[in-house]
């Protein structure tokens, strides 16, 4: 079942002559985990903003074509309606945290209160989320007194707690340490297994190699490539063409191939690399 | 040289972010600071340029106690590139952004022009010098913030997460600039261990407001106890080189060279 559909979608920000997104046609199925990569300025963040309806309801500009989210037309719907379907995690927590609460727990409860969720359900979800994302030590602290990375964890938790049908993440772990990143991805993986549709915009190909089913490359406002994760992420020529750094493991196997130390498909995951190492060691 | 003596820093909210740190950084060193979010990394570097003043202890930069000088004076010696370019950029033109610091430091007009033109040519933004910075993409804005610090030619330059949000081209551009700072003391905070392995010689590991390890990069990346405590993973090249029975390598390039020697 299709949960997200772009039909000839173009977007031009007010004050600009050329569109940042150009006639995109894209369909995402329910439960898919889609990774989106590309150069800075390719239009990826704008595409993320359009799914929640920030484009066109918050940013002024020219909207052409259609975006249908879980049967709802983005252009004619309201932000509040769309926010019950789509959760958007921004790159910077300062753009996400409401400031409505003076503690992490209150910040997490804020969105649920606005949706009119029962009090006992809010308390249950907040307690679970605090534990899941490793915020126990900070639950009574003001989010704005935490470090940048800790704030980002709160921001991510504030979206995940709403249990959206579609989770859109715009560079969500850019400020997180490796453990924080792992916690977030473990949680996202858990959500994906529950059937939540995920669109992850990132520069970190290593993360996508492990989690994504499908990869979209954006370039100059258009979709330059769209395919299964393994075939896209191990196509070094394609990645280089669109200014994307391949994963360390793919690069390693590619260079080993160049030096005639390896002659099989390129590695994507640590498991692939371990198999490569075992074979090389046997020689 | 930077000398940190029993540095303790407590925020007004009562958070004790740094606990009796002692550290010496020599001129020209390339240092990486790693550790979990909330370990105290950013608080430490803000104490180096006087943005924060020690609650207890002292920070001496090139013989000057940071408690006794204004931030503006410290900026002549210590340049600070913020993580988010939006926290640093405020001028209506690219050229103005570079000129601002130079004007504040009292440079003469012709020197300001010379330095501004030179750094803008270096980051390939000279042609756009009269454009508003908001018309630049994220990578270009990041380069602009770096250039505005480099124009002042400080002896010490601090980078807080310099490649966060950068694409491949942006990363390469930032790496090229940092590599060119041969005679400067460079301090980098990053969660990207591959990047740290390529850019620095010495690594300081922080955890819960304390320095738990301070050594050469190769020793730190093999110090499992410190890495586990700080929840840091070594570069993948190190894991692979160990599995292949090679000499420990920190980059893919080293790994390939070693593999070539062993598996001919």
Image: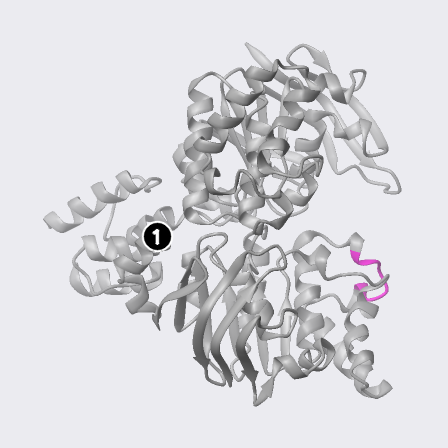
Residue annotated with mark 1 = B233
- Which residue sits furthest left? A282
State yes or no: residue A62 in magenta: no
Q: Nearer the viewer, residue A181 or B210?
A: B210
Q: Residue at x 43, y 57 (%)?
A: B208
Q: Which residue is drawn at 55% across and 56% down?
A: B15
- Which residue sits furthest right? A15
Left of B194 or right of it: where is A277? left
Rendered-image quadrant of the N terminus of chain A: top right
**How many neighbours does mark 1 have within 10 angstroms: few (below 14), some (14-19), or many (20 or more)?**
some
| Residue A92 seen in the current view | no
Find residue A229 and report its horizontal and vertical position in percent: 44, 32
Determine whether A258 is above or below A232 in the image. Answer: below
User: Image quadrant of residue B155?
Assistant: bottom right
- Chain identifier of the residue bearing label 1 in the image: B
Q: Nearer the viewer, residue B204 or B185?
A: B204
State yes or no: residue B129 in magenta: yes
- Which residue sits furthest front? B14
> Under tag 1, what secondary structure?
loop
Q: Which residue is drawn at 49% across and 50% down?
A: A245
Left of B87 or right of it: where is B180? left
Find residue A266 and report its horizontal and vertical position in percent: 33, 42
Which residues are drawn in magenta?
B128-133
Find residue A275 and report its horizontal and vertical position in percent: 21, 41
Find residue B113 and report its horizontal and vertical position in percent: 82, 81
Left of A58 or right of it: where is A190? left
Q: Main secondary structure of the magenta part?
A: loop
User: Image quadrant of residue A17?
Assistant: top right
| Residue B188 seen in the current view | yes
User: Image quadrant of residue B252?
Assistant: bottom left
């Amino acid at each position: 079942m299709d949960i997200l559909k772009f039909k000839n979608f173009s977007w031009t920000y007010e004050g600009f002559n050329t569109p940042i997104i150009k006639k995109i046609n894209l369909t995402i199925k329910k439960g898919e985990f889609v990774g989106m990569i590309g150069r800075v300025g390719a239009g990826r963040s704008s595409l993320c903003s359009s799914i929640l309806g920030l484009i066109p309801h918050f940013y002024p500009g020219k909207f052409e074509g259609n975006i249908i989210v879980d049967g709802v037309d983005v252009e004619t719907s309201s932000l509040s309606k769309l926010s019950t379907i789509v959760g958007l995690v921004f790159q910077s927590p300062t753009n996400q945290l409401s400031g409505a609460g003076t503690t992490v727990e209150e910040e997490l409860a804020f969105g649920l209160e606005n949706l009119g969720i029962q009090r006992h359900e809010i308390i249950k979800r907040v307690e679970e989320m605090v534990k899941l994302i490793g915020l126990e030590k900070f639950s009574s602290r003001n989010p704005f007194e935490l470090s940048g990375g800790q704030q980002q964890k709160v921001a991510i938790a504030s979206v995940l707690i709403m249990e959206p049908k579609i989770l859109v993440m715009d560079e969500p772990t850019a400020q997180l340490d490796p453990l924080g990143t792992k916690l977030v991805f473990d949680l996202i993986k858990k959500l994906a297994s529950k059937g939540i549709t995920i669109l992850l915009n990132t520069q970190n190909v290593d993360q996508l190699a492990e989690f994504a089913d499908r990869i979209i490359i954006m370039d100059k406002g258009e979709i330059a490539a769209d395919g299964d994760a393994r075939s896209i992420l191990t196509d070094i020529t394609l990645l280089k063409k669109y200014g994307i750094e391949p994963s360390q493991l793919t690069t390693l196997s590619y260079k080993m191939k160049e030096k005639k130390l390896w002659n099989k498909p390129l590695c994507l995951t640590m498991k692939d690399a371990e198999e490569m190492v075992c074979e090389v060691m046997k020689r | 040289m930077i000398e940190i003596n029993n540095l303790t820093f407590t925020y007004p909210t009562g958070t004790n972010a740094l606990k009796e740190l002692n550290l010496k950084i020599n001129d020209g060193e390339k240092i990486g600071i790693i550790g979990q979010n909330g370990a105290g990394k950013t608080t430490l570097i803000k104490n180096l340029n006087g943005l924060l003043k020690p609650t207890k202890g002292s920070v001496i930069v090139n013989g000057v106690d940071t408690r006794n000088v204004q931030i503006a004076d410290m900026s002549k010696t210590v340049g600070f590139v913020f993580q988010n370019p939006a926290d640093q950029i405020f001028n209506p033109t690219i050229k103005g952004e570079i000129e601002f610091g130079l004007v504040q430091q009292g440079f003469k007009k012709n020197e300001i022009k010379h330095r501004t033109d030179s750094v803008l040519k270096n980051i390939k933004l000279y042609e756009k010098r009269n454009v508003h910075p908001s018309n630049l993409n994220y990578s270009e804005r990041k380069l602009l913030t770096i250039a505005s610090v480099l124009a002042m030619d400080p002896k010490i330059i601090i980078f807080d997460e310099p490649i966060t949000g950068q694409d491949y081209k942006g990363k390469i551009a930032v790496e090229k600039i940092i590599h060119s700072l041969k005679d400067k003391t460079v301090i980098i905070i990053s969660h990207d261990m591959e990047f740290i392995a390529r850019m620095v010689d010495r690594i300081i590991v922080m955890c819960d407001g304390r320095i738990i390890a301070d050594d050469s990069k190769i020793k730190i990346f093999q110090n499992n106890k410190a890495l586990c405590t700080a929840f840091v993973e070594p570069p993948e090249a190190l894991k692979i080189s160990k599995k292949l029975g090679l000499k420990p390598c920190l980059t893919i390039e080293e790994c390939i060279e070693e593999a070539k020697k062993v598996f001919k």
